[in-house]
Amino acid sequence: MATQLLSRPEEKTERRARKVTERQRPLWLLAPGGILMVLVILIPLALALWISLIDLDQYTLRRWVEAPFIGLANYAESLDAGLLHSIWISVSFALIATIVTVPIGIAAALVTQNAYRGRGLVRAVFLIPYVLPSFVVATVWRTMLQPDGIVNSLLGQENSLWLSGSRSYWTLILVEIWAAWPFIYLMSLAALQSVDHEVHEASAVDGVTWWPKLIKVILPYLRGPVLLACLLATLNHINNFTLPFVLFGAPAPDNVNVMPMLVYVTSFQGLRFGLSAAMAVASLIIIAIPLFVYLRAVRLDVHEEGGKR
Amino acid sequence: MSANAEATRLLPRPMLVTLTVLLCAMVLVPISYIVLASLNSDVGVASGEFWPSSFSLESYRKIWTTADLSTGILNSIIVCGLTAIASALLGTTTAYVLVRYKFWGRLTILRGLVGLQSIPGTLMLLPVFVLFSSAGNYLGLTVVGTRWGLFVAYLTFALPFSTWVMVTYLRGLPRELEEAARTEGASTLVILWRIIMPLSLPAIVVAGIFAFLLGWNDVLFASVLTRPETHTAAVALQVFGASQEGGALPVYSQMMAAALVCAVPVVLLYLVFQRYLVGGLTAGGVK
Amino acid sequence: MRTRKIMALAGATVLAAALTACGGGDDSGGGSGSGKTLDVLIGANTQYPEEFQAWQKSISDKFKAQTGATVKFETFATANDELTKIQTSVVAGSGPDVYAVGTTMTPTAYSTGAFVKMGDDEWKKIGGKDKFNPATLGISGPDENNQVGIPWVSRPFVMAYNTELLKAAGIDKPATTWDELTQQAKQLTKGDQHGLAIAYKDNFDPWKFVWGMSVQAGNPLVDGKTARLQDPTVQKAYQTYFGWLTNDKVVDPAAVGWTNPQALAAFAKGKTGYFMLTTTTATNSLEQGAVKGKWAFALLPTVPPGATTRPANGVEAASILSGDNLLVADYSKNKDLAFQYVKLITDPEVQLDYYQKFGNLPANASALQTLASDQRLAPVTEAAKKSVATPFTGGWSDIQLALTNVAVQSLPDLAKGSLSPAQIDSRIATAQKSAQSALDRAK
C-alpha cells in the first residue's frame, strides 16, 4: 500500500501542500524551545561576551558588575597565552577522532541490523563505552596506561610513556575513539531503520550482491544522518573537557593542551575569568567560521524533500 | 531462512561474525578489567593486578558510604529522565515546524541550532550560574540547588541536538499521511500526536537517549548547580577522583564498582527501549 | 498499545513530581540559634567515610546542644572543586557560612576579599589567638592585622623510611641534609631495592621539593613583588630532584608515572628505603602493606643540596605550612553561629578526637602538646613546629602551577633517562615569566 501512496503524482499534492502551509503555520510550536534557548543559552552567552571585555579575576570577582572595562586587551593576551596552539590541537584531534569513528560506527550498525538471538545484548554492549560516565572512562584508561599499568605489561613494554611525551596526543585520540564511536553507531542505526523494506526486496530481486548493494543503495540513506553526526561529533570532541582533564591532569603535557583545558585552567585554577572568556569566545569564532561555510555549502534546505531521498 | 531476512541482510555471514566479535572485544576487554578490578580490593588494584589475587564484593559494599551514591543515582535518573522526555517531545514539535513549513528565518534557525553545539561548556558555566543565582536573589525564585534548575539547564543544552535528530528523520517521512489527515480536518497537534510521533519512534528514542546521556555525563554544571540533597551521580563519583590526591591509597576498586553501578540504569533503560529502535516506516500507516 | 501509553504518561508524571519533591534550595530560618542551620564546606574523606559521617553527626549534635542550631556539612571532592565553589559563592553572594580551606589556597581565598577579617573581637569569640600553635598562624593572612584564616588542623610533610632496610645497610639514622640523603639512597639501591620512592607525575609533590631546597638556601621564591625563580638555588633544586632518577639512579624508573598514592603503594611493598613526601594521613595505608611495623617518620632534610650546613640566610624549613584553615564568609548571615562552630572544633578535646580518627594533627597548642610524647609522632610534631609558610600572595597558585609545569614538561626527558641543565633552564625561564606576570597582577 505504501508504494501506491508514493507513486501518486507529486504535482497536485505539492500545490495543495503549499496552499495549506501558507495558511495555517503553527509557528507558535517554536515558542517553548525558543524561549528556553534564549533564556538559558543566548543571555548567558551575551554575559560571557561581556565578561570577556572586562578585567574579571579573583580580585574583582566579588563586585563583578563594577569590574573595569578593558576592551580587547583580554583577546590580545589570549593570543600570547598559546590559544592558537590549543585550538590547533583541539581541531586536529577532533577531526582525526571523528574520521576514525565513522567506519566503526557504521559497521556496528550494519552488523546489528538483522535480528538474531542475543542481538539485544550485543547492542547493549556496543553502547557501554558511551554510557559509562566520561570521568570514569578517563580514570580507567589512565590507570591502565600508567608506566607500570596493564597495557604496558600486556604489550610487554617496560615503562613506556603513554600519558606524557610525544605519544600522549595519540593516547588522547585513542581513548576518545573508544568512548565516542557509539554516537555514530546510534545515528547510523536510526538512519538504517528508515530504509524501506521494498528497497531491500528490490535489490534482492535485481540480484545485487552485498558490496554494491551496500555502497550504492544502503549507504546513501545513511549519508545525511552520518554527516550530521560527524559534524556534531567533531564539535563534541573539540569541546570535550572531562576526558583530557582527568586523563592528563593539569598542567597537561604541551601537546595535549586542548582548548577546553586551557579555558578551564585559566578560569578555575588561575581565576582569570575575563581572559578565559576571551579565549573561549575567540575559539568559538575561529571554529564557527568554517562551520558556517560548511553549513552554507551543504544543502540544509529540507522543505522540498518529501518521501525518499 | 525466510526471504525477508535474506533480503535485508547487509553483510555476508562470516564478515558479520568477525566484525561483531572484533567490536565486542574492543569494548569488552577494558570492561573486563573494570569488572575484575571491582571484585578486587583497593590495595590489589593499586599494585597493578589484572586478575585479582582474591575475589571479594567488599567494594560494592563500601561505595554506598564512601560516596552518596544512592542519592546521586536517584537524582540523576529523575533529572536526566525528564530531560530526555521533554527534549525528545520539544525537539519533535520544533523539528516538525522547521521541516514542513516555509517561513522567514527558517534556514537561520536550522544553522543556528548546529552552531549552538559549538559552544564550550566551560564558557557557559559562570554566566549560567550568575543568571540562575540572580533569579534567586532578585526574583526570589530559588533555582540554584534545585533539580528544576539543573533540568532547565540540561534541557536547553539537549534541545538543539534533539531537534536536529528529528529534523533529519522527519525529512524522510512522506507527506501523504499528514495531507490525508489534514483534509479530514485534523489539527496540527492531532497530526503530531497521532501520526508523526508513532512513525518517528526510532528517532525519538535516539534523541531521548542522547539527551539523557548529556545530563548523565555532565559534571561541571551539576557540581555548581546542586546541593548535597540534589547531587547527581556524576558529582557523587567525583569523590573517587579526590582519592587520587593526598596521602592515601586510591580507592580504585571502589571507583570501578561505582562506575559499573552507575552504568547499570542507563543500560537497563536502553534494553527496555531498544525495541522502538526497530521501527522503520510502517507501510501504509494511515489511521 | 493504550496501556503502554498510559504507563508512559504515568511514568513521566511521577518523574516530574519527583523533580519538585524535596528539591534543595536555600535554607536560612529566622530567630536566634534555634531552627537555624549553619552551612559548612569541608573536604570529603574517602579513607574513613563511615567514621567521617559519624563525626559530622556528633559535631552537629554537640553544636545543637550548645546553640540550638544544626550544622549541615557540604563536602567537596578536590581542591579544584572547592576553588570553584568559592568562586561561585563569591559571585552569587551566598553559599556556605564556613569554609575549610587548604593552607596553600588561603591566599587565593583572601584575595577575593569575601572573607571575614579576624580582629580582636573575632579572635575572642573563638577562644583567643593564643590557643593555637603559633606556627600555624603563618598563613592566615598577609600580616598580623589582616588575618582571615583560623587554623584548624595541620598536616606537616615528612618522609617515611624503612627501618629494616636502613639498618641492613648500616645506616643508623635518617639523613638530615639532601646530599646525605642522596648518599644513603645510593647505599640502599641494590638488586630490586630502590633508595627513594618519589611521585614525579603527581600534580602537587614536585614543587614542594623545589620550594624546600630553595628556602633552605635562602631563596623564598617571592621577594615582595619579584619572582625569584630564575635563580641558581632553584636550578640546583630541580637538578637534584631530577638527578635522583637520571644520574644517581636511586629511584625506580616507573616513578616517572607515579602519583603520590602510587609512590606510597610502592614504598608499602617494603623494597624502598625512603618514601619522600607524606603526612600522618598515610599511617593507615602503610600499616596495610608489607612494610607494616617496619617503618617510621623522619624530618625532611633541612640543609640545601650542595652544602653541609645551612647558609646564613637559609631558613630551617622542614615542611610547607600545610593543613586546613577555617574561613568565615563575609556574606554569611550567621556569623556569630559560625564563630561558635569554629570555637567548638578548635577546642582541645574535639581536636584530639579528630586526630585519633583521621590522622590530622591539631592546630590547638595544648592538644598538640599532649601528642608530643608519642614517639612515632615526634618527627611530625617537630615538622609542625618547623613549618614555614609559602609566600602569601594572590598569585601563589599561578606560581605553584608554573613550578609544577617545569616537572610535567620534563617527564618525557626523564623517561628517556637524561635531562640536560639547559633544558631545565629554559623551562625555569618560562616559569619565571608566568610567575612574574602573576605577581604583577596581584593586588
Image: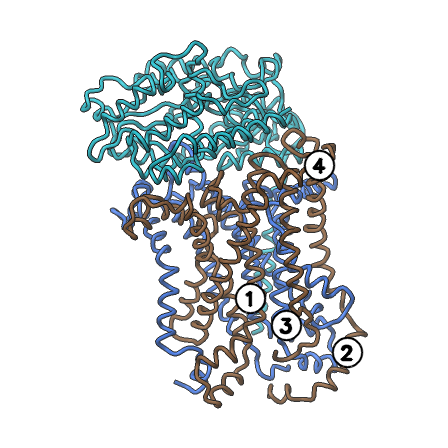
**Earlier sequence position, callout 1 versus callout 3:** 3
The residues tagged by marks 1 and 4 sit, at their Cα atoms, a distance apart of 44 Å
Q: Chain of mark 1?
A: B
Residue that appears at 49% across and 50% down: B73
Compared to residue A181, the image places residue A136 above or below, namely above
Q: Give the labeled residue for mark 4.
A: A54
Please tell me which residue lies in front, B122 or A258. Answer: A258
Q: Are marks 1 and 4 in contact (CB under 8 Å)?
A: no
Q: Is residue B80 left or right of residue C263?
A: right
Q: Give the labeled residue for mark 3.
A: B170
Amino acid at circle 1: Val
Q: Which chain is blue?
A: B
Amino acid at circle 2: Arg
Q: Colour of chain A?
A: brown
Q: Give the labeled residue for mark 1.
A: B205
Q: Which mark's residue is nearer the viewer, 4 or 3? A: 4
- Residue A235: where, in percent of width, then height? 58, 56
Mark 4, other Cα within 10 Å: few <14 / some 14–19 / many ≥20: many
Please tell me which residue lies in front, C51 or C378. Answer: C378
